[in-house]
Amino acid sequence: MIVFDRLWKTMKSKNISTYTLREKCGIDSKTVRRLKANENIETKTLDRLCRVLCCKLEDIAEFVDSGDNPDN
């Protein structure tokens, strides 16, 4: 499972709010909601977040093994 806990920490350290993401960076409120719920988002959104926050992907997202992989 991909989680976005690091996104909120990175945003806080850079003093960027969800309002800024929505109003000045073109990330809509539905996407912000999906990020908060750790739901699927498009890779272009990840790209935009990294550009806006001047960070790497690992600064905003992390893989956490949920243990319920059907391939095991």
Image (cartoon, helix red, strand yellow):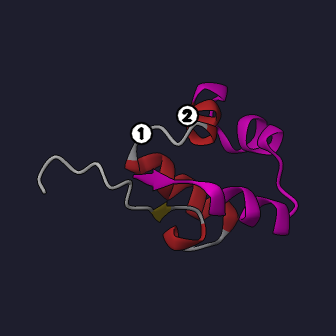
72 in magenta:
no
* Occupied quadrant, residue 59: bottom right
- Dots 1, 2 in contact, CB < 8 A: yes
Is residue 44 rendered to the left or right of residue 32?
Answer: left
Residue 36 picture location, percent across and down: 64, 40
Using the numbered discs, state the Cα–Cα distance from disc 1 to disc 2 in whole angstroms. Answer: 7 Å
Whether 15 is drawn above or below 17: the answer is below
> For mark 1, what is the residue?
40
Q: Which of 61 and 43 is in front in this view?
A: 61
Label 1: state its secondary structure: loop
- Residue under the point 59% across and 25% down: 30
Q: Which of 61 and 66 is in front in this view?
A: 66
- Residue under the point 78% across and 42% down: 18
Whether 50 is drawn above or below 40: the answer is below
Question: Which amino acid type corresponds to the residue marked 2 in the rendered image?
Answer: Arg
* Disc 2 residue crowd, few under 14, some 14–19, many 20+, Cα 10 Å: few
Is residue 26 rendered to the left or right of residue 58?
Answer: right
- Residue under the point 82% across and 55% down: 16
Residue 8 picture location, percent across and down: 72, 56
